[in-house]
Amino acid sequence: MKQCRTIKRKPRLLRIPDAVAYLDNVIKERTMRQWIFHGKIESIRVGGAVCIPVEALDALIERGKEVA
């Protein structure tokens, strides 16, 4: 029987707690939720979950580097 190979890749969407962890917990979940509510960071709904694209988090990090 043939075995399926496992493909490991970086997730493209993160839930809020995972997105905060991706940012090394420098902000709180509440702050992330406020940013989402006010449109400061891109988010999408998948079912009942609010998810943030990794690309949006990377862009946030880059904007922070420009300011510093």
Image (tube, grey):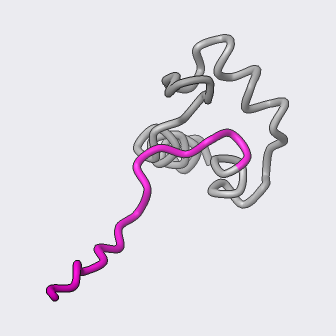
9 or 19: nearer the eye?
Answer: 9
Q: Is residue 58 left or right of residue 21?
A: left
Instruction: Tell me the chief SS of the magenta region.
Output: loop
64 or 22: nearer the eye?
Answer: 22
Residue furthest toward the front? 1
Q: Residue at x 56, y 26 (%)?
A: 41
Q: Is residue 5 above or below residue 63?
A: below
Q: Is residue 62 left or right of residue 23?
A: left
Q: Is residue 41 left or right of residue 56?
A: right
Residue furthest toward the top? 38
Q: Residue at x 66, y 11 (%)?
A: 38
Q: Is residue 31 above or below residue 38?
A: below
Image quarter where the N terminus lies is: bottom left
Mark count: 0
Q: Residue at x 49, y 24 (%)?
A: 44
The location of residue 26, given as percent across then percent down, is 79, 52
The location of residue 43, given as percent across then percent down, is 52, 25
The location of residue 59, given as percent across then percent down, is 45, 41
Residue furthest toward the left? 2
- Magenta extent: 1-17
Q: Residue at x 55, y 45 (%)?
A: 14
8 or 25: nearer the eye?
Answer: 8
Q: Is residue 50 magenta?
A: no
Q: Is residue 6 left or right of residue 30?
A: left
